[in-house]
Structure formats: C-alpha cells, structure tokens
C-alpha cells in the first residue's frame, strides 16, 4: 500500500511520482487532471487511440488489457508508484502477480479482482459482510441457468459474471427467454468464463451511490469516510442522471425540502424520454419523506458500504487499501415510510454517477481518489451546493469526429456547466459528455441539467 506521503517529485524527471491508469475514459480523464494538478506524471492505457484521458496524459499505450503479458510488460517498463484500474476489462491475475512483485495496485489487487467478478462479489457481500441483497443464484451452463431462474422466480435478471454498465445483462420474464439471455451474457461479457449470475428483480423506489473513501487522515492513519449519498436513475441498465444530496432536510419542519422524485415518476420520464416501457413505477413518487427517514436511509448506506469496503480491503481490523469506492444501492420505502437499503454492486474507483461531485463538493470524487491513492492526507469533504448531472448521449452509430452545437443555449441556463469528453468516435447511446447544474432545489437542478444535455444532444453533427 502507498505510504503516507509528504512530497511529490517533478514529472518527466528523475525521482518523479508516477501513476499508470488502466483505462482512459472520462473518469480516467478527471483522475489524470487531478494527478497533473499535483505534479504527478501520468501514463494511460486503453484499447483504442486517443481516448479522453490520453489527451491530458504524458504518455499513452494502446493495447488489450486482458492480455496479461502485455499488461505486465507496460507496468515493468514504466514502474509507476500506483497502478489505477479504471475499467473492468483487465487481466486481474496479472494485477495480483504485479502486486506480489511490489507494485501498488489501487486499492489492492484482491479487491480489484473481486469487484470485477460478480460471483466473488456477491459471495463477499451477502455471505461474508452479510449485507442485504436481492435473492441470487449462480449457473455454469444453460441447464443450471434454467433451474436458477426457477428458484429465484420471474422476472429475474441474468448477468455476465464479468461485466459492468449493464453489458451482458437481460431481464427474463419466462423460461423461453433464458437461452437468449445466456447467449447475451456470454457474448457481451468483459472478461473470462461462461458462468452467469441470476438475481431477483428489486423493485426499488430510487438508487443511491455511496462514494466510500479509504484515505489517510492528517495524522497518517487510514480511515474510511462517507460523503453525502448520490441519488441516481438509469436508462435501462445505464447511468443517466445523478444528484447530490439525494434529499435535502428542512430542519424547521423535520421534513424533506422537496418531494421525492422517484423511479418511474414524471421527472424521471422527462429526463429519459427514450427509455422503453418501465417495469414498474415507484408508489412514493411525489411524497415528502420525513427527516428521520432520510437520515435512516443515509445511515444504512454508510453501514452497508462500510461493511463491503472493509471486506474488500480490511485485514485483522486494519484497512489495507486506498481510494474511492462507488457502492451502488437500492432503496425501498414501505407503506409506513420505513426504508430498506439493499446492496447491488461496488466499483473500486470513481463512479460514473459520482461525476456530479464536480459541481457539488469542495473535492470531486476524482480529486479525492487521486489524493487518497497518492498517500496524501484528506482532512474532510463537504457538499457546497445541491446539484445534478445528466448524460449527453450519441444518437448515431459508427461516426467519427462529432461536432457539438447548441452550446451557447445550454451554457445560457443558470448554474450549468457542460463537459465534452473528446471521444473520437460514436456508437448509439455512447456517453459523449455531461451537463452539470446547481440550484438550491434538487428537482430544479435536475431539470436544468436535463435541458442543457438535451440541447447539446440535439446540436450534435456527425462526421463520416
């Protein structure tokens, strides 16, 4: 693990401090920028040329990171102070070997391997950390999958063992759909193996990401801190919109400051007009939750995220890893207003939903991650303003060099910032940018971000 640090070298010179980013997308770009601000030499690796993070790094390698020999060769050549995985398509056995050689893998190689493997992760969360999850089963072939789906019950979700962002996942409503779901899981997996996971459908009211942070405090002690939870909603299985805090409390009334804008509600349907028919709609959309309920949800989020993170990087009561974890959680509220939080997944890196922290927090998730993995102290973090983020998606397949229009209209909306990631090519619904918005009111921030994002989407022109 990276030791507590008091100094940083000069980039491109002897004695420099260097990080190697495995994955160079938009999240990696923000990490690279934060590392550069600290005077750190940054090197990126990805499967294609000129990805977003490579555009701001000192050097870039294009390669398949599932190739263990190639991955080991790059690491041994560069000899970075920290190896920072930013995607799932990585040979995790090679990371374990490199860690044994003395390289620091963020947050640690074992955690990276487990979080990229849904079977290992579900066993750790449900059976070791004992946090609430949806019912689940594992299957190694089609016949086992049929039996697993029957045991979990329909509808259920079939997921690839190694994947993310919904790739390889299918909702199955009956036995006739199981063979197709199995083929999808095998074809779209981002890793190795044909085993799949079956999960019961959790009809949540909304989702939360808890960005748990393992870091040094100013006294050089490793601790886990919990920023305010980030609320988010998806388009199908893909991130679409997020906001922080997930709800604001009015201390005078003891109630939420605004009604709950939940899954399937009017605002959600406006934000994601392209979504297919929703499987359910929250019964609590438009309700105002009590301060007690909001705090109970927060407390459960912190507890669940803490247990899973400690299971990943803890040993003998000590924390032996550094960095931020994006812990995905489902929130259900019963008829009496009592909440229940369920663990879904966790990533040992900044989370796409957490990009909203660039508008809301004094230190963004990327800034927190960079400082933590470099062994620098973090005295605290806080939300400065409510805010929201909304994705900007491609509308075309196989196009190069898109050009972005309507920027003057989007940036004319109060409190709005637009981030364009610089991806060289498109595919349908690829994430090309993000609209960030702030407001004193969370629903208003969501509406501003939505308006700005949709304006830019309408203004995109595509090359050949």
Image (cartoon, rainbow, N blue to C red):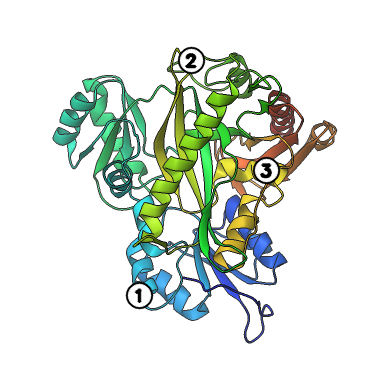
Q: Is residue 322 visible?
A: yes
Which residue carries the number 1 mark? 100
What is the secondary structure assignment of the residue under circle 2? Answer: loop
Counting from the top left corner in percent of width and height, residue 22 is at 50, 62
CB under 8 Å between callouts 2 and 1?
no
Q: In terms of sequence position, does the residue under pointer 3 or pointer 1 come before the other?
A: 1
Which residue carries the number 3 mark? 463
In the displayed structure image, the side of residue 172 where residue 216 appears, left or right: right
What is the secondary structure assignment of the residue under circle 3? Answer: loop
In the displayed structure image, the side of residue 128 where residue 298 appears, left or right: right
At x 50% / y 36%, what residue is drawn?
299
Q: In terms of sequence position, does the residue under pointer 2 or pointer 1 come before the other?
A: 1
Pointer 1 local density, CA inside 10 Å: few below 14, some 14–19, many at least 20: few
Q: In terms of sequence position, does the residue under pointer 3 or pointer 2 come before the other?
A: 2
| Front residue of 80 and 334 | 334
The circle on residue 281 is 2
CB under 8 Å between callouts 3 and 1?
no
Front tag of 3 and 2: 2
Counting from the top left corner in percent of width and height, residue 453 is at 70, 32
**Which residue is situated farthest in the bottom direction here?**
14
What whole-number distance in Å separates the C-alpha atoms at marks 2 and 1? Answer: 48 Å
Occupied quadrant, residue 395:
top right
In the displayed structure image, the side of residue 410 where residue 146 appears, left or right: left
Counting from the top left corner in percent of width and height, residue 64 is at 43, 61
| Front residue of 321 and 413 | 321
What is the secondary structure assignment of the residue under circle 1? Answer: helix
- Quarter holding the C terminus is top right
Count of marks overlaid on the render: 3
At x 26% / y 50%, what residue is drawn?
193
């Amino acid at each position: 693990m990276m030791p507590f640090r008091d100094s940083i070298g000069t980039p491109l010179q002897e004695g420099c401090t260097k990080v190697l980013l495995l994955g160079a997308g938009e999240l990696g770009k923000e990490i690279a920028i934060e590392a550069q601000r600290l005077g750190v030499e940054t090197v990126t690796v990805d499967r294609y040329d000129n990805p977003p993070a490579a555009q701001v790094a000192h050097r870039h390698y294009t390669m398949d990171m599932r190739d263990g020999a190639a991955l080991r060769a790059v690491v041994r050549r560069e000899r970075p102070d920290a190896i920072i995985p930013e995607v799932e398509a990585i040979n995790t056995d090679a990371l374990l070997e490199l860690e044994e050689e003395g390289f620091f893998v963020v947050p640690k190689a074992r955690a990276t391997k487990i979080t990229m493997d849904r079977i290992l992760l579900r066993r750790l969360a449900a059976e070791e950390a004992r946090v609430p999850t949806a019912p689940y089963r594992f299957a190694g072939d089609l016949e086992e999958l049929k039996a697993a789906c029957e045991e979990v019950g329909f509808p259920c979700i079939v997921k690839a063992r190694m994947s993310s962002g919904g790739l390889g996942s299918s909702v199955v409503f009956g036995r006739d759909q199981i063979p197709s779901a199995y083929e999808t899981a095998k074809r779209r997996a981002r890793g190795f193996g044909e085993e799949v996971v079956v999960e019961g459908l959790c009809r949540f009211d909304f989702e939360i990401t808890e960005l748990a942070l393992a870091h040094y405090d100013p006294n050089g002690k490793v601790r886990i801190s919990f920023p305010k939870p980030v609320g988010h909603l998806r388009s199908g299985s893909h991130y679409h919109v997020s906001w922080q805090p997930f709800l604001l409390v009015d201390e005078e009334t003891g109630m939420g400051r605004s009604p709950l804008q939940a899954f399937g509600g009017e605002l959600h349907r406006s934000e994601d007009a392209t979504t297919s028919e929703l499987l359910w709609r929250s019964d609590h959309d438009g309700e105002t939750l009590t301060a007690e309920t909001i705090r109970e949800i927060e407390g459960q989020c912190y507890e669940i995220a803490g247990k899973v993170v400690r299971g990943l990087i803890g040993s003998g009561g000590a924390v032996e890893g550094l960095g931020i974890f994006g812990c995905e959680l489902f929130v259900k509220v019963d008829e009496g207003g009592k909440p229940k939080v369920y663990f879904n997944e966790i990533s040992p890196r900044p989370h796409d939903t957490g990009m909203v922290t660039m508008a809301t927090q004094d230190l963004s998730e990327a800034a927190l991650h960079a400082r933590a993995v470099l062994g620098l102290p973090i005295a605290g973090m806080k939300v400065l303003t409510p805010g929201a983020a909304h994705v900007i998606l491609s509308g075309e397949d196989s196009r190069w060099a898109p050009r972005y229009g309507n920027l003057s209209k989007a940036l004319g909306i109060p409190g709005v910032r637009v981030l364009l990631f610089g991806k060289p090519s498109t595919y349908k619904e690829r994430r090309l940018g993000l609209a960030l918005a702030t407001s004193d009111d969370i629903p208003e921030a969501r509406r501003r971000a939505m308006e700005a994002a949709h304006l830019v989407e309408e203004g995109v022109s595509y090359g050949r």
